[in-house]
Amino acid sequence: MGDAGIETLPDGLSNNCTLMKPWDGPAEKKKPKWRFDTLQIHAGLEDHPRYGQCTLPIYNTASFKFASSAALNVALGDIASSQNHLYTRVSNPTHDGFEKRIAALEGGQDALAFSSGSAAVLGIIMSLAGIGDNAIISTSIHSGTFRQFRKAHSQLGFEPRFCDTNDLKQVQLLLDDRTKFIFTESLGNPMFSVPNFEGLAAITRASDVQIPLVVDATLTACGYFCQPAEWGADIIIHSASKWIAGHGTTIGGVVIETGRSDWQRNQARFPALHGKLPGLLGDQDDWYAAAGNRAYMQYLKTECMRDTGPCLGPFAAQQLFIGVETLSVRCERQSKNAGILASWLRSHPRVAWVRYLGLEDHPYHQLALKYFRRGFGTVITFGLKGGGPEAIKLIDCFNLIINTTNLGDSKTLVGHHWSTTHKHFTREESEAMGVYEDLIRLSLGIEDAEDIIEDFEQAFERI
């Protein structure tokens, strides 16, 4: 061996020739702190793709092989690791990439993909609470979530205590030793209420409480309009079928743990995380001792996902992973269209009222100025002077705008809650959720705003 980095060839092969050692590549790259628009494209990609692929592969396998029984047992016993893939019902590398991308966009620590947003909500209920427990639930929530909590009461023995969660005194009155979490939405659907994040977080983090603040952040588009973790949320939920997917193609859900408080330390309220769940026979794992403030997500994945099976398929995970790459581009156009349509509808002689968070007279506008960024969302509601019957006629006359129960699509969507999704609720329940007989919900897409307005004009002419 001669000078450093120079290898002398063996005698007889060359006359005084030298050969450079092969370059091993650069030192390990230090990941930069990317901004939102870059994270949505690059977060979650494999650091060392085996074949140099530029996107996330679909790992279409039910299970994963191990070189030995000993290796399998090590993986089964390592409850602190999220990278030991054994069975796709629990985890999969495609899921892993999607989960990392969503966690990055929401400023979270860990994420777990579910088969739907509803499955994610049920996973929260079953993992945090049991028979005789309760949670404080905002009345300004999605009707499907309201129904889930009501069924959990009748079928699982869990009590949802509904209230206006911005009434902090009422929230404190409802708290007791069996309260396991507070649940709200970052933008109430369809009331467009905005929570007092800091006030609620102060309650949940009190030394004699220490429970998670759970926020369904679906309508704030995966951190684009609002990042609840920044304001004290501990667990974030999304229906990934909406803004994350972006094109109405794929059903999915996701839960994110933010790591912003140490609520998981509370053994008295969350004995399962400490291996002390009452009534369970056999040995129990102490998740908190093994994983610290990652205990809950490991428990949610390894215990709840394994035992109840609400897993996302790898193909769906990749669809959602790709869909979110255009999130900020879509939201920017949708938000602009929402502002244009809100102003246009407000000036129309046949429109009685318009509700849009960006309007200065909206009751939650000031809270939105505090907690939101990049706009006020992409959904508006309005009512016609002709009431509910005229609302149905208008919807039936649209050509471009699609009548459906979804929202957050790249296409503009419309719906009449009173006669469809809320018809099984009492009047009092619907009105508590912000739904009235004349309400029309409009989820703006990325079409040209003038084409959306022209569709309204021709529809108004026909009724």
Image (cartoon, rainbow, N blue to C red):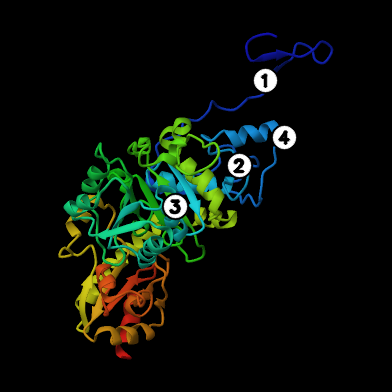
Which circle's residue, 1 or 3, is located before the other in the chain?
1
Residue 85 - label: 2
Q: CA distance from mark 1 to mark 3?
A: 58 Å
Residue 22 visible to an observer of this rendering = yes
- Indicate which label's residue lies in the foreground, 2 or 3: 3
- Residue at 68% in and 8% down: 2
Quarter of the rendering containing residue 8: top right
Q: Residues within 10 Å of mark 2 (few under 14, many from 20)?
A: some
Q: Nearer the viewer, residue 352 or 264?
A: 264
Q: Residues within 10 Å of mark 4 (few under 14, many from 20)?
A: few
Reading the image, the residue beneath label 1 is 21
Badge 1 marks a residue whose secondary structure is: loop
Q: Nearer the viewer, residue 225 or 150?
A: 150
Reading the image, the residue beneath label 4 is 67
Quarter of the rendering containing residue 313: bottom right
In the image, residue 222 lies at what x, y percent?
A: 38, 53
Q: Are marks 2 and 3 in contact (CB under 8 Å)?
A: no
Q: CA distance from mark 2 to mark 3?
A: 23 Å
**Is residue 326 shown above or below 2?**
below
Q: CA distance from mark 4 to mark 2?
A: 13 Å
Reading the image, the residue beneath label 3 is 126
Q: Nearer the viewer, residue 290 or 333?
A: 290
